[in-house]
Structures are given as structure tokens and as C-alpha cells.
Amino acid sequence: GVQRDTGDNGGRFAEARGRTGGRASVAAGLGYERNGAFESAVTARLSVATYLRQPGPGAVGDTKVTLNIGNGIKAPSVFQEQSSLNALALGAGSVVIPEPIGPERSRSLDVGVEQGFADGQTRFRVSYFRNTFEDLIEFVSKNVLPQVGISTEAAQAATFGAYVNSS
């Protein structure tokens, strides 16, 4: 079998920022992660903020609307990788080799309104956010593996169970 936990992991992130007419700002970024466990993954994010009312003195100050959207990953731990169904099947010389364990994935959305009061000394913010997660890593016992679509041969290779990416 091939050991994938080489520790030869790395990543890059590039970000661009800009302003439009002093009212709005935009930041966009793109990331690339390379990991011995799951090869590679790309992440992206976008942030936009615009003033509906510019900052200034007074009881009611600036009003800003914000939008943040992006996706991310979380790499499996070394223990999860070494106890994954793929690693166990490779170690047992199984005929059926399941896919390697991959990263957990997330998508986030945040929309908000921020209001300044009392010459900028007080701020009030209301926001809506939604986070979704996919490919979560979970431990599945040996008896349950065939029920989640793992072949009987691969399930036999697991002593107690294995880590897999769930839906």
C-alpha cells in the first residue's frame, strides 16, 4: 500500500481588494491546498461592504451593508487518515480499495447591516448567517460499513471500523 501521510502539505492564498467611489469595498480570495491525504482542494471567498449612509458626526451615523460568502476545508487528522477505510483496505490487501478519505468541506454565507450611533461610539449589527457542511469525517463500526455502501470485502479489512467521509 501507499502511505499518503507524508507531511508534505502546503497551500497558497491570493487575495485582491478594491474600493469603488469610497462607498463600497470588495475583497476576493482564492486558496489552493495540497495535502498528502487528499491531494488538493480549492477554496474561495468574497466579501463586499457598502455604505448606505457615509460615516459622519451626529446621533445617527453611518449605515453599512455587508456580504461574506466562501467555502473552506478541514483536513483529516493523521489518526483519521491512518484509520480510514482506504488505509485499512490497503493494509489488508483487499481486492476492493475504497476512495481515500477527503477533507471536510464547508460553505458560509453572512449578510448583515451595521448602524453607527453617537458619533461612532456605539454600533449595532444585525446579521443572517448560514453554514453548511459536507463530507464530514465520521467513524463507522465494522458492522455498519456494508449498510453505508462499503463492500463486504472492504468491511472485513476493518478490525473495529473505519473513518469515512459521510454525506
Image (cartoon, rainbow, N blue to C red):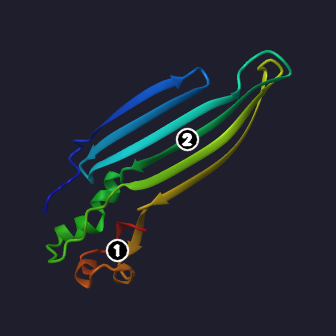
The residue shown at (37%, 38%) is 30
The residue shown at (28%, 79%) is 155
Q: Check whether the beta carbons of the residues at disc 2 and disc 1 lie within 8 A of each other.
A: no
Q: Describe the element under mark 1 as helix, strand or loop.
A: loop
Tell me how far mark 2 sits from mark 1, CA to CA: 42 Å
**Residue type beneath disc 1:** Phe
Q: Which residue is mark 1?
A: 160
Q: Describe the element under mark 2 as helix, strand or loop.
A: strand
**Residue type beneath disc 2:** Asn
Query: Residue 115 vs residue 44: left or right?
Result: right
Q: Which residue is mark 2?
A: 68
Viewport quadrant of the N terminus: bottom left
The residue shown at (78%, 20%) is 121
Q: Nearer the viewer, mark 2 or mark 1?
A: 2
Q: Is residue 36 above or below residue 167?
A: above
Residue 124 spot, x, y in % from top left: 77, 33
Q: Residue furthest top?
A: 57
Q: Is residue 56 above or below residue 100?
A: above
Quarter assignment of residue 16: top left
